[in-house]
Amino acid sequence: MTKKQTKSLVAAIESQPTAEQLKERIIRHLHASLGTDVNKASAQAWWRATCAAVNEVVYDGLRTTQRAHYEQDTRAVHYFSLEYLMGRLFSNNLHNLGLYAQAKQALSELGHDIAELEDQEEDMALGNGGLGRLAACFIDSLATMNLPAIGYGIHYEHGLFQQAFQNGRQIERPDSWREYGNPWEICRPESVQEISVYGYVETVYDLQGQMKKVWHPGRIIKGVPWDIPVVGYQGSSVNVLRLWESRASDFFNWDVFNSGGYVDASRENIEAETISKVLYPNDDTDAGKELRLIQQYFFCSCSLKDIIRRYKRSHGDDWSQFPAQVVIQLNDTHPAVAIPELMRILVDRADMQWDEAWAICQQVFAYTNHTLLPEALESWSVRLFEKVLPRHLEIIYEINRRFLLEQVDVLWPGDNDKKRKLSIIEEGHNPMVRMGHLSVVGSFRVNGVAEVHSKLVQSDLFPEMVALWPDKFTNVTNGVTPRRWLKACNPRLSSMLDRLVGTTWPTNLKELAKLADFADDARVQDDFMAIKQQNKADLAKVIKELTGIAVDPSAIFDIQIKRLHEYKRQHLNLLHILALYRRILQNPDYDMVPRVFIFGAKAAPGYKLAKEIIYAINKVGEKINHDKRVKDRIKVVFMPNYRVTLAEKMIPAADVSEQISTAGKEASGTGNMKLALNGAITVGTLDGANIEIAEEVGDDNISIFGLTVDEVKALRAEGYDSHDYYHQNPEIKAVLDWLETDYFTPGKPGELASIKHSLLEGGDPYLVLADFESYQAAQQKIDGWYRDQAGWAKKAIMNTACVGKFTSDRSIQDYVDRVWQLKPCQVK
Ligand code: F58
């Protein structure tokens, strides 16, 4: 082959395939990769063959990107997260590669509907909620913005449980997203790592009399990396999400095996593989379980070794450039054990002096806080830590000793109270390692995820740390990727936007502001509402299929989608539904715009009250949906198994977005951004990013209610008694009493009483009753607004127009400017 021919061949491979070429590739893969034929291939086989055809393009981008990063020896961010809630990748990859239309045509010519093939894919649900989905949006933005980045996490065999309802109650089933293999992942046996746990630490002295610590591990575990290519929009960079799977170490296992312990060896196999078996399904409390700590350490250690291996390829044993090349973002405290692990590698393995090693650490790590809820602040019992990671505990003690001596005691000499408050070790009967403290001390930057949240992190959570290091603290307001959360999930609205504001909005979301010029234009209003109507009709079909409930697309679609938690207050929504229902029963002509209240939420399997709330919503829904007297003014729908794929169908169809957490409790929220972007009007408290959404869209286009953060604090300080509200507001009293009867659970009175009890005897910790009245007023406002369709259309349009700030590209740019100091790397 001549040079010229080679060149054109390379160009042909790298250029975008046409629909015709895609067809050929799909059929080739049907034959050569799947061993089947067009005549007998299943939908699953067609889907896999199409993925393989798409991967030809993806892998081109992957190779080019990796070559560019290697040759330019770029500084890179390493995102450490225990969770990535990726959802499906098929349509996302096609959209980002600009191949969706071609693939649709190719498949249609082959006799297949692309939407049907999309349904062949299981969600990759390796996360619980907001934090995991944020990680997924961030890696999309990083690739799109050509930033050198790698995401590190765990290759869970089972992602978040699948939810079903049995007589209204949540039941959990295991999620086996890769039971039959996953076409997007590549196993990389050449990059396997080994990590150690358990054992004991020995103090030894070398020939110069220098003291050294030697860790004799009790167990060695192998980490096998799986790479998921992360395709940037418009095919610029293709980065990698590297997820570690645990296996038994061959070396260790053979030892046991050869000494006759076949059964023991198999048991160890199983134990090692347990580490990456399942995602912990709690979205608030930390589990405090040994396996969870091992999970955290396992992926941190594998990832650090991977980073160091790559660094050494270019820099050998010269550590001086390490902080210039490597920044590690800790997604909450879950990967904080990476801090003592890097210290161990530098001090014990690379024989570095403590001060030098600590200086490196403090330039490498940055920490994002996602919660202020006390029960979610991670801490580990010292006893457990010592058992699993004895050497790391020693290192943490030393970090703490120096911190208290060199920082705390210098600013507050002799102040033992301050020391007690700031110590990484919480003293007491059962001493604990505070992972938040460790993360702040070991990082050069700490951020919250919305303005108000970042302020509270500083004022309420770590005020003394702020006194020590005022410049360490910053804010990065969350964002969401507009590629998945508008372009791919809402094609109708996307085409309209292309026409009205141009086609660059997916990478420059502020362009949507141009839409505001059309907010009063009657034709645009009609088009916008017609699109919403079609999206609602689509969702109505899904609702019918999944729940059997018929809903009218001309009603208001009022949507609350998020994990189930008392602080998110799905039960406040429920009380309002009950109040409306009661008004209808009392006044058959009660005038309200028909509304469909739609919920999607999983409850942590061990969270009893959350599960009771799901049950109550289902039971109340059953009753209302079948009550002829309601005349369809209210419908209540609880969508089973809420997940990314369902969110993609619900969000484009929402008229109203419920963001009703107690002020000060929701760090940011990101569903609020997705819903507003798709033209839903928020009913919300002044909490998290709602505050910033309100600033952007303006008071006319959002329905705000409830106590503010300061008012919540004041009310608590003066002594909140929920009974006052119960006795003073007859509507509250009536609906709470109703829950104790058997009206919604015939023959079984009291089945729904736990909600009432938590709000009265339980003290109503999230101030549901205090906010009820203003909530119902905010809902009344919505009802009034909706009656004026042109007025509503304007508000909806203004929501889409004004939320350009909330693209994850802007969040990532903030991280680049305020934390990472990273430069883009052009790959082509
Ligand atoms: C969420 N946290 C916040 N944690 O609640 C939400 O306000 C924020 O928008 C989002 O992070 C992104 O910043 C969250 O989702 C978890 O799911 C953890 C999982 C592991 C155990 C502790 C909670």
Image: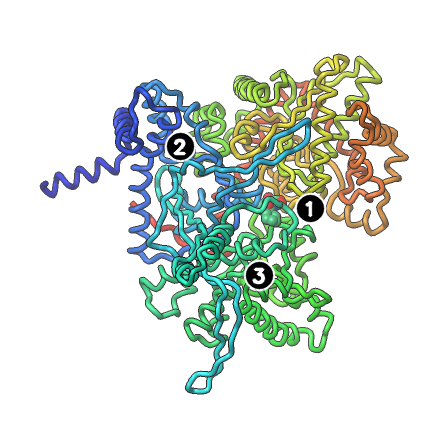
In the picture, measured across the screen, residue 750 lies left or right of residue 511, that is: right
Question: Where does the image place residue 147, in percent across and percent down from the top left?
Answer: 40, 49
Q: Which residue is found at the position 29% from the left and 41% from the top?
A: 60
Dot 3 alpha-carbon crowd within 10 angstroms: few under 14, some 14 to 19, many 20 or more: many
Residue beneath the point at 64% across and 22% down: 791
State the CA–CA distance, disc 1 to disc 2. Answer: 35 Å
> Would you identify the image quadrant in which residue 50 lies?
top left
Q: Mark 2 points at which residue?
A: 95
**Relative to residue 206, is residue 515 depicted above or below?**
above
Q: Quadrant of the C terminus?
A: top left
Q: Earlier in the sequence, mark 3 or mark 1?
A: 3
- The local crowd at label 1, few if under 14, some if 14 to 19, many if 20 or more residues have their Cα within 10 Å, is some
Q: Is residue 11 above or below residue 199?
A: above
Q: In this view, does 589 lie to the left or right of 268?
A: right
Query: Which residue type carries mark 1?
Result: Lys
Residue 633 visible within the image: yes
Q: Where is residue 254 in the image (x, y as percent from the top left)?
A: 39, 60
Q: Pointer 2: residues within 10 angstroms few (<14), some, or many (20+)?
A: many
Q: Quadrant of residue 404?
A: bottom right
In-front residue for pair 425/690: 425
Query: Label 2 sits on what residue type?
Result: His
Q: How many labels does the image show?
A: 3
Q: How far apart are marks 3 and 2 (CA)?
A: 37 Å
Disc 3 residue type (three-letter): Ser
For image coordinates 69% across by 52% down, the residue present is: 375
Secondary structure type for disc 2: helix
Residue identified by numbered label 1: 665
Q: x, y percentage for residue 172?
A: 60, 36
Instruction: Return the residue found at the far right.
Output: 727
Find disc 3 in the rendering and name its residue. 439
